[in-house]
Amino acid sequence: MVDRAKRKRCAIYTRKSTEDGLEQDFNSLDAQREACAAYILSQASEGWEAVPELYDDGGWSGGNMDRPALVQLLDDVKAGRIDIIVVYKVDRLTRALADFAKIVEILDENEASFVSVTQSFNTTTSMGRLTLNVLLSFAQFEREVTGERIRDKVAASKKKGMWMGGGVPYGYDVEDRQLIINETEAETVRLVFERYAQLKSVPQLVDELAAKGIRTRIRIFNSGRVAGGIHFKTGTLTHLLQNPVYVGKVRHKDKIYNGAHQPIISNELFDRVQSIFAENRRDNASGKKSHNPSLLTGIITDPDGKPMNPTHAKKGSKRYRYYVTRTLPGDESDKWRMPAGEIERLVIDAIARQLVKGSCKGTDEAREMAAQLSQDRQTSIDLPAMSICEQRALLLDYKTRVSINSETIQIEITPPNLDQPVKLSIEAKLVNRGSDVRLAIAPDNGPIKRDPDPVLLRLIAHAFAAQDLLVRGISSPMVNHYKQRHLQQLVRLSFMAPDIISAIVDGTQPPDLTGRKIMRINKIPLDWAGQRKMFGFASA
């Protein structure tokens, strides 16, 4: 009788890289387990006994540790339920030297060990560890060489146009490892290509196919799982329409070779469909298909270096556009937000003023770019006069990048004939980053023209109406419902300096001059110089 203190709980781990043959009554996993069980039985006098749990990884590669049975086995080792791991060969446990080091570390921490029944060595000695490392190095080498050989074989076969497995394309069947046209599905493929060439829209084509009841192929896997038989989705149709297999070709990475199978559609139709896709991509990038295209989409980044996406908010019938920091779901970091019209106008005016209209004082590359722009368009470009789509197309052509920093706005433009970008730096201040994380831009090199602030405009109008009511007794429906105290607050604004009022009307007031700020000031100076200083029109 073996002393319970000397018992060694042994776990048998088996693995096979592919699922081939696993459906047999006696497969490779069973053979490995039988050999390991016999070895454990031979060590019964030493207290070895097999645990009843099965740790089998059928169809899992030994190139990494992301295997369900291995994960469970190591968890049991950490929990103190396993003393020895028994494998048929070391490469069943792992084929990667780095992974083996991690496994050994886990075993050492939990006073456990492992045994290979077909390879004799002792991991408790330095020589034994060296022997094991050499074996694993060759196992890893074998795995990498096998992978390279398989990849080379696939590449060579595809160069000859052979079908090398994978998902069978809709419209074809596989017989003797060859793609054979499925006439029923092929009719649908032809319809899909022809209708897209007419509609030029994948979403519309999805709706049309759904209305006709056309569905994807039903596939039944060896496990019994059923997939397919659903309406075509946008992604599925896009992949189908761009797959060169339908013109008798095969794709391998970024190269296309003539295939050994028969085409379903003509090269002319396929090329026409691809040109429509290319045209749609250009139109989407330039914003031609958008009802409200945003000039700097995919171009602008916030002060933290994160990209900014266009968004909008509506207040009554008025629509306000912004660029807001794009964050991942669950990201709780602050978002930057700035008025879209203001930053867009600043970028366009800067490019037009410094590069196109000849006022550039920068590098020779900048002057060369201005000449190139004029040469491309046969005339000097008036960027502000272009439509948004035309402006965006030009910015994309010249790889424009806009970076918002704490003190400057950096603009980079790379014309096609230059290797280095032309860099423009505009002095600016980012203000009003408060609880609402809204940004405004206040350049030091002169006011920027922007859309007038509707709140400030309404306050000015109400201020003069309040003056008419309180001073001249002329009533106005704009202010008749206000209380006396609010009327007195409003009337103060009618006595602001004319240039301040003109700036508000033109939209050139300092960005941090808001309606809330004006109404919260208890005492506005009567002298105009003091007002300009208070409201940011003159330096302190």
Image: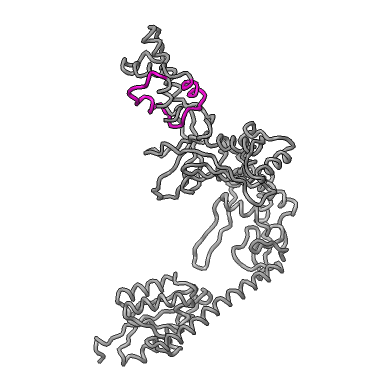
Can residue 487 be seen from the camera position used here? yes
Q: Is residue 430 magenta?
A: no
| Camera-side residue of 380 and 168 | 380
Question: Image point 54% across, 44% down: which residue?
Answer: 410
Q: x, y percentage for residue 170?
A: 63, 58
Q: x, y percentage for residue 412?
A: 59, 45
| Camera-side residue of 211 and 423 | 423
| Camera-side residue of 434 and 353 | 353
Where on the picture, by quarter, is residue 487? top left
Q: x, y percentage for residue 361?
A: 63, 39
Left or right: where 246 falls relative to 56: right
| Camera-side residue of 536 and 226 | 536
Question: Image point 39% across, 7% down: which residue?
Answer: 472
The range drawn in magenta is 499-527
Question: Image point 35% across, 19% down: which residue?
Answer: 489
Where on the picture, by quarter, is residue 525? top left
Vertical order, 88 against 187 (above or below): below
